[in-house]
Image (cartoon, rainbow, N blue to C red):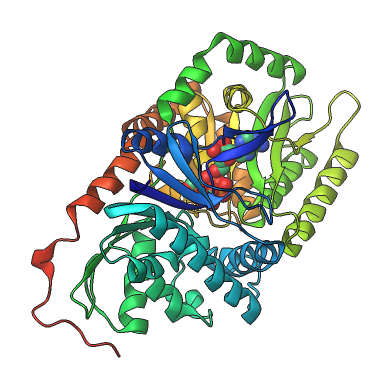
Amino acid sequence: MTSDLVIVANRLPVDRIELPDGSVGWRRSPGGLVSALEPVMREDGGAWVGWPGSPDEELAPFEHDGVTLVPVVLTSEDVEEFYEGFSNATLWPLYHDVVAKPEFHREWWDAYVRVNRRFAEAAASVASEGARVWVQDYQLQLVPQMLRELRPDLIIGFYLHIPFPPAELFSQLPWRRQILEGLLGADLIGFQLPEASGNFVRLVRTRVGHKTHRDRIFLPDDRTVRAAAFPIAIDTAGYESLARSPEVEERVQEIRDAAGGRRIFLGVDRLDYTKGIYPRLRAFGELVSEGHLALEDVMFVQVATPSRERVGEYKRMRDEIDRLVGRLNGDLGTIRYPLISYLHSSYPREEMAALYRAADVMVVTPYRDGMNLVAKEYVACRLEEDGALVLSEFAGAAEELRQAWLVNPYDINGIKSALLEAYGAEPKELQRRMRAMRRTVLEHDVASWALSFMEALASGPGEHLKPLRPARKK
Ligand code: ADQ
């Protein structure tokens, strides 16, 4: 059986669960991408190629919720070298402004090539003649070209969920040209922001030597590739209706009671060094220790789900934040009023919605972030048009949520002023800002994001823009 629409992503959209009778079952993973694509996939009898999540697991393709799932095996060595290594210790820091130092290892690169080829082969085997294949994210940047070589009949899209760095940083990568050429196998390459697609087009022109015009790249084989921004969004209606539900309402009250009437500052992140958890807690701690905020009036809830725990930089950062939280609570907290409530759990969406509704000030301060869905989810849950968002100007979301209190996450004093201003803002001011931001997240939701990408993919790159003579490869 083959499919007309194939998604290729590092992970399958399901998590393994144990059923009551002890057998293995699968449950749809939480997450915006999965819910955005599911309706499209089901309608088109789609397939999803991805890793099931544990090493050395060989599984035959199977059906789940009307979608064909095609598992790709990763050995323990692949997980170490391709996933933890090249994807998360080379590309991730390099693409996020080298917030941490990227590591370059030739064995990791070999694993990246090897695993990308495996994904491309799996996709080639399930795509029907002329099918659309949509490849996701930084782990699979070589798949478009490998797939095109195997199956020139396919229409191939690629979407990068994280930033694409400026040439000065990208050029550090020993395999920069291979990555650019890998991506150019796609017909359409989507980025979060125009800045990222601009970086990519410029690099293709200078490093690979292809002719470009605005968002079009003209290849010597007569193909035209389009690179453009498609800012990702959330399931706004889903979050709104969750936030409105009586269960969530009840939970909001419980959270407020537990806070003992104190106003809540909230942070929600994967525990990742790009997210700027440290500077926001420092800033908050200083406001309390300097007497600008009183311990009886405020508390900080920081939800930080551990992730990529075997990568060295993540361990170091976790220790650093653990120490900071311990010190702030030890120095400033009391039995009645601990200052920071620091939670490592992963929560169901209902709990997230309740936290968003209970929080007076949402603090999102990444050093660099492709979009940041948390900021948009907070806005979607603020049905009363209140609450304040403090947002890093280096998150993609800052391009759309202009009415947030925008901060430079490297500037602790700047964060402190923004936190104070947001905390002290008049209800009218909060409403003015929140109303405008709510309009933005209502207008652009994840379904319209997926649809606009799919439409652009179907409509092709615009043949009329082809130059008379194709550029020669340098
Ligand atoms: P992430 O770096 O994971 O995503 P983000 O966009 O904030 O960052 O998405 C995190 C998601 O996980 C949100 O939907 C949030 O609700 C959820 N989440 C976080 N902590 C949780 C917890 N403890 N329990 C349950 N759910 C939790 C990458 C890029 C981003 C880009 C997205 C989508 O790094 O820049 O916005 O992909 O393209």
Report which quarter residue 247 is drawn in: top right
Instruction: Give coordinates of residue 7: x percent, y percent.
Output: 41, 49
Establish if 467 lies above or below 234. below
Q: Is residue 192 visible?
A: no
Establish if 194 lies above or below 283. below
Q: Residue at x 40, y 39 (%)?
A: 37
- Asked if residue 19 lies left or right of residue 208, the reply is right
Establish if 315 lies above or below 246. below
Instruction: Give coordinates of residue 214: x percent, y percent.
Output: 22, 67
User: Quarter of the picture for ligand 1?
Assistant: top right
Q: Quadrant of the C terminus?
A: bottom left
Report which quarter residue 151 is drawn in: bottom left
- Asked if residue 415 lies left or right of residue 220, the reply is right
- Asked if residue 463 lies left or right of residue 82, the reply is left
Q: How many marks?
A: 0
Instruction: Give coordinates of residue 409: x percent, y percent.
Output: 59, 54
Q: Nearer the viewer, residue 428 or 31?
A: 31
Establish if 33 lies above or below 107. above
Q: Is residue 394 visible?
A: yes
Q: Residue at x 66, y 52 (%)?
A: 57
Q: Nearer the viewer, residue 176 or 47?
A: 47
Q: Residue at x 75, y 29 (%)?
A: 22
Instruction: Give coordinates of residue 193: x percent, y percent.
Output: 37, 55
Q: Residue at x 38, y 75 (%)?
A: 181
- Asked if residue 149 lies left or right of residue 417, the reply is left
